[in-house]
Amino acid sequence: MIGSLVLLTVGIAVSTALPADHVLSRPVPGPRYQYMSSPDGPQLVDMWVKTSDVMAAARFNPDAQNNYHLFTRSNRAVSQPIPFRNDAILRASNFNANRKTVFLVHGWRNTPTSDFNVHLVAAYLNAQDVNVIMVDWSTGAGGDYWVALPNTVTSGQSVARYINWLNSVTGANLNNYHLIGHSLGAHQVGVIGRNLGGRVPYITALDPAMPGWLTHSQAFRRTDGVYTEVMHTDAGFYGITSPAGDVDFYPNGGSQMPGCNGNRDCNHHQCIFYMAESLTRGGFTGRRCDNVNQAQNGNCNASGTLRMGGVSAKTGNSGLFWLRTNAGSPFSQG
C-alpha cells in the first residue's frame, strides 16, 4: 500500500512538472477540428496551434533530414540519392550540369511514392532530357498540419542551400532551373526561389495551400522567380483563391474539377495530373480574364490566350486565365 502511494505521488509530481500544452493561436475560423486534404484522403485535423506543435517543428532539421533523389533518362525507375554536401556521391551520379534541372517539392503527408512525385517525374523525363530532383521532406511534412506548416519554410531555406551547393560542385547554372511544388510544397518553392534571390527562371505553384497562409509572410508570391505560374483547382477550400503569380490559371473556375463530383480532396490534387499532361501533351489553352470573379465564373472575354503549364517559362506574360478541362485523361480540350 505504501509503495502504491509513493508511485502515485511520484506520478502526480512528474505530471505537474511537465509543461502544459497551451493553445497559442486559432489561425483558421470555424470548428477546432476540421478535415484537411492528404494523399490518403481527408484527415481530421486539430486547427488550433499548440505548444507541442511549436516544439515538434523546432526539432525538424532539414539540412540533415531532407532527402534528395535524382532521376534522369538513364535511371527513370530507380533514383540516385544525393545527400547534402556529399561531393563524391554527387560527382559519381548521373547529374549533368548541361541539362535543365527540375526540383519537385511535395505537400503535406506525401512520400516519394505519392502521385505528385510519381506522375511528374515520369512526365518530365518523357518530355525532356533533364535532371529531375525529388525533394523528400516527408520527415517535416508527415506529422500534424501545424507542424508541417512552419517546416515548409525551414525546408525551403534548406533546399535553397542545397541548390547553391549543387551548383558550386557541378557548375550547373541557376538560369536553367524549374521548380514545381504542390499545396504546402507550392509555398515552399516560393521560399526556395526567394532565398535564391528571385533568379529561378520558372516556378510553378500547384494549388497553394490556404489554411494558415492567407496572411503568412512566407506565402508564395509573384516575385519569387523570374516567371511564376499558379494553378488553382480547389480555390477557397484547401487552396488559395487570390492571384499569387505572374500568371494564375483557374481551370473550370478554380474549384470544381470535372470528374471529382464535388470531392474537395480530388479537386486539390487534380492540378497534379493537369501539370503532368501539360508537360507531354500541352493543349491547355486559357482565355484571359479581367478579374478573379470572371475567372471563377468562366465569363472571360478579354483578348489573349495562354497555354497552362508546360516545360518552358512564359516570361513576360501576366494576368488571369480561365479554361475548361475534360473529366478524365486526356484532360486538355486543346
Image (tube, rainbow, N blue to C red):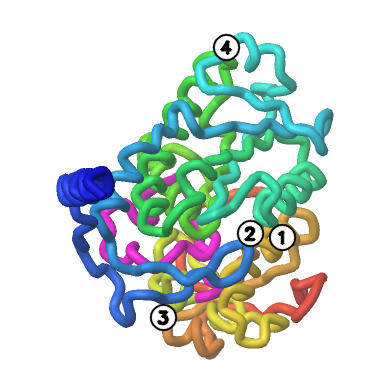
**Front of the two marks 3 and 1:** 1
**Marks 3 and 2, the one that precedes in the sequence:** 3
**Marks 2 and 1, the one that precedes in the sequence:** 1
Residue type at mark 2: give it.
Gly
Mark-to-mark CA distance, 3 and 2: 20 Å
Which residue has dot 1 on it? Answer: 278
Which residue has dot 4 on it? Answer: 87
Q: Residues within 10 Å of mark 1 (few under 14, many from 20)?
A: many
Which residue has dot 3 on it? Answer: 291
SS label for mark 3: loop
Which residue has dot 2 on it? Answer: 309
**Front of the two marks 4 and 3:** 4
Q: Are circles 2 and 4 on residues that touch, CB within 8 Å? A: no
Mark-to-mark CA distance, 4 and 3: 48 Å
**Marks 3 and 1, the one that precedes in the sequence:** 1
Residue type at mark 1: give it.
Ser
Residue type at mark 4: give it.
Asp
Q: Looking at the picture, how far across and down is residue 19, in whole percent?
A: 18, 49
Q: Residues within 10 Å of mark 4 (few under 14, many from 20)?
A: some
Q: Range of the magenta residues? A: 206-234
